[in-house]
Each structure stands twice: as structure tokens, then as C-alpha cells.
Image (tube, grey):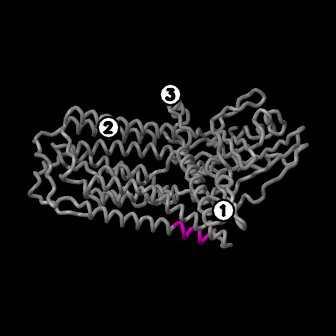
Amino acid sequence: MSHTISTSALPPAPRVGVLVWANSIVLAVLTVAFCVYVFPQWWNNPDLSHGLAMPVVVVLLGADVIGRRPGWHPRVNGLLWLACGALALLGFAALGVAGIYAASMEWTHPFVYFTLAIALVSLSAAVALVLASRPIGAVTFNWAAVTILALWLLSVPLPPGSLARLTINLQLWITDHVLGALHLLGIPANQHGNVIVLAQATVGVEEACSGVRSLVSCVFAGLFFSATLVRRPWPRVLLIALAAPLALTMNFLRSLTLTLLANAGVDISGFWHDATGYSVLGITALILGGLALLLGRVSAPPTTPTPPPAVPRSRPRGLLWSLLGVQCAVVALILFFLSGARPPDHNNLPRPDLAALLPATPRGWLVKTETDLQRYSPILRTDAMEQRTYVRPDGDKTIQLTVYLAYWAPGQVPVSLVASHTPDLCWPGAGWEALDRARVTLHLRDQPLPPAEFRRFRNGDFPQNVWFWHLYDGQPINYDPPTDPQSLLKLALHYRFRHGGSQFFVRFSSNQPWAVLAREPLVQEIIHGLQPLGL
């Protein structure tokens, strides 16, 4: 909701100097570069499609930030120096961590996106504080400025670990509440993990139906509406607080509707699945916008706002020079990363024969080869997949081992796509309950293997121990980003900020612990064949 501010009531802003323009231009260039960098994620990742509106949001909210307006105009003192210094240092450090961490994998890893967003937000906050200070007043540090900073963090991928935990928790919450609603309606149904078993159909609450997309989009919209349609603090807080529950409620109604349709014999794949998804997003946005309009009307501010305090004639030149120096150092660090980037040496390796890596007729084992993996090709964007399940009786128990392999050529897909389809995210949607997770070092014939990601699942009375490796250019990716600066620096110096490496995904799953599998000649043969790939 807009309101008119009398220009005569405001003290005149001082003339914007060269240092102010220099800081503003460098920050604008960094912001545009970040948008170009993250644009493929906005365009290709449905969970981040709201990011396409981010440039427009910055322009719209920027109109309420630029210039001397009622809001916070801090004094130039020791506290401002300390705050700007801390923010600038955090931004520079986040950029360094992002670049060094990308050295071991790829610039498209979700953790890299997130740390770069932190770098941009920190640096932007430092610049905004200085430009909003009373000697300058080129901008105003108000709610619109805070909203812009917060929305950047909602426009990039979450780190894989955080995303996996959020997705699994939402899947379980949706499944539990849909099952409870079905029982209240008198519809018999059972639950297996995130799968609801009906009398005539089975409905799985997959990761795409968990509500992550609607949750993030709704909070994004709530923040935007709070800055454009609501003018008082407490109504803004109320609007933002209602955004997440509204998103979860609407996604629950969508999941319940699809489950009821499936129970009635309707095929919910395709049209119904997509139509309800887009409808929920649209209806949620309309409800949130209407609520913002209502809160904006009942909380309209006085027609004559309190003008900002008088403006001293002095300027914080030292602070402006220091901030400009930090921004130039950031640009120099980015150029260093770009100049150090090099493609890895692949020696023109041909596409590996994955089927040949998995024995087809091992002695004493019953073998089942998965024949319909190609149905996942559109999602995983590869047709190089192979999976075989081996079963053998061993005394009073049965040993079951499933080995899955997938391959992507250099530059075929970003690391973030492969990382978004790990067992953490995919298995719960098929009815598996996640129990444990860890990063472990396995041994074979007393020789250590590269560190593996370990997960333990259960589907009813059927347990599965899962070990997997995501190999980028022959090196395993750590799904818990390293925080040791020395280790990060070693990665950077060794890999020279490479890009475009080939990727393998190797998964072992079994009803037995690794100590049992490691004694099997079959496992030793498979591991030996995978060693040239980086295992």
C-alpha cells in the first residue's frame, strides 16, 4: 500500500559522491553476475522457479529503498564500523569457502550456490548500511531492504543435507495427516513409510509432493507482500508467520484430494497431479495476497510520516574507501577462481560398460537384472544405468545384495542434479523409513575404500543397509561439506577449481552389514572392477 510523503518535510539529501557511486556500481555488477550464475537453476529447477521473479522484486522493492526516506539511518561510529566490517568479512569468507569447495566438485553444487548467496547478502547489507548512514542518505535501511536480503537466500538451492531432512520430515507429516483424514472419513488405508496403501490403489508421497516447493514459494511471497502491502511491524510478522502453515495446509489438501481420487479409481498421474500442484500454488498466493491487503488496510500508517533526523555535513570517507576495497577484493577473488578453473584430464575415456562391471552369472547366486530403469531417464537425464540384485542362502539366513550404477559424461548434468536424487530423497517416497545416516570408511581385504555415505532404511520388516558414492571426476563427494580451512585449501590447490568432470553414482544395498559382504568374493570382484572409476 503506497502513501504520499511530503518532500518538504524531509531534510535535503547531500550530493552523492564518487565513492558512493563506485560502491553502488560494483555491488550492482556483482548482483547481476550472481543472477546470471543462478539463472539456470531458476529456469530448470521447479522448486526454485520463483527465483525468476527476483530481479523484478529487487527493482520494485528498490524503489522503497533508494533515497532518503523514513527508516533507519545509522550514525557513523564505532558500532557501524564493526557491523560493516563483520558483514564484509563474512561475505569475503563465504565467497572463499564457495570457491574452494567447488574445487573438489562443481560450481553447480547446492552448497556452493548457498554460500555464494550468503556472500552476496552479507556484502549487500554492508553496503546498504553505509549508504544509509546519516552523512550520506543515498538509501534507507528499512523493511524493504531487509526483505530483499532475505529473498536472495530463498532463491537458491538449500544444502543437500538440509534439503533431505526437510523433505523427509514434510513427507512423513503429509503422509501421517492424510492417513488420519482417511480414517476419519471411514476409508481403510495402511501406511508404509511415505506410501499409503488403499483398497484399490497405492499412493506415494514423493519428494515433489512433500511441500518443499509450496513452502519456500509461500514464504517468498509472504515476505514480498509484507514489504509492499503492509506497513506496520506486527502485521508484517503475522503475515510471514502465517505463510508456512498456509503452505502446509494447502499441500495437505492437495495430497488428500489426490488420494481420494486414487481411491475412487482415477489415474492421478499426469494431468491431475500437475493440475492440483499449480492450482495449490495459485490459490495459496491469492489467499496470502488477500490477507496482506486486509492487514495493510487495518494497519495503515499515519499520512504524514516522521521525517528522518537532520543530516550532518561530514562524510564517512574512510568507511566508503574500506568498503570499496573489500568489494574490489571480492572481484579479484572471483577473477582468481575463474582464471584457475581448468577442465580435468579425461584422456578421452570412452563411455564405460556398466553391465560388464556387474557379474551376470556369479556362482552360487541368483541374479535379477532390472530391465525398466530407462523410465527414470527423463528425471536423471542419463540412459547409462544398470542395477542387479544378487541373492544367496547362507546357513539360516539369506544374503541379498543390490548394486546400482549410473554414469554422466563431463558436462552432461550439474552435480546438483545427481545430488538431488540420492536415497535420502528418493527412497522415502517408495515407502522406506529412514533410520540412520553417517559418513563411513569401509574396508575390503584390510584396505580402506573411499569414504562412503551410509544410510539405514526399513520397509515394514525388511531392513536395508545402503552405502553409496557420488564420484565426480574419480573423487567421492562429501555430502557433509568440510569446514576445515586447511582441507579446503588443499582441495583448491590440487584440483585447480576444475569443472566439467564425469560423474558416477554407485550404490550398494543389502540386508546384511558390510562385515558380512566384505567376505564375499562377489563383492570383492565388483569393487575391483569399480576401482578404475574412482572407487
Q: Earlier in the sequence, mark 3 or mark 1?
A: 1
Q: Is residue 165 left or right of residue 318?
A: right
Magenta segment: does it hold 271? yes
What's the CA distance linking mark 2 and mark 1? 53 Å
Magenta segment: does it hold 231? no
Residue type at mark 1: give it. Answer: Val
Q: Residue at x 64, y 39 (%)?
A: 436
Q: Is residue 348 left or right of residue 47?
A: right
| Residue closer to the observer: 381 or 48 | 48
The reply to whether dot 3 and dot 1 touch (C-beta < 8 Å) is: no
The image position of residue 174, as x and y in percent, is 57, 57
Q: Which residue is mark 2?
A: 326
| Residue closer to the observer: 329 or 318 | 318
Give the crowd class for mark 2: few <14, some 14-19, many >=20 residues within 10 Å.
some
Res. 203 mark:
1
Determine whether the residue tagged by mark 2 lies in a helix, strand or loop. helix
| Residue closer to the observer: 75 or 530 | 75
Q: Which residue is mark 3?
A: 486
What's the CA distance linking mark 2 and mark 3? 23 Å
Numbered range of the magenta stretch = 269-277
Residue type at mark 2: give it. Answer: Val
Q: Earlier in the sequence, mark 2 or mark 3?
A: 2
Q: Give the foreground label among 2 and 1.
A: 1
Give the crowd class for mark 3: few <14, some 14-19, many >=20 residues within 10 Å.
few
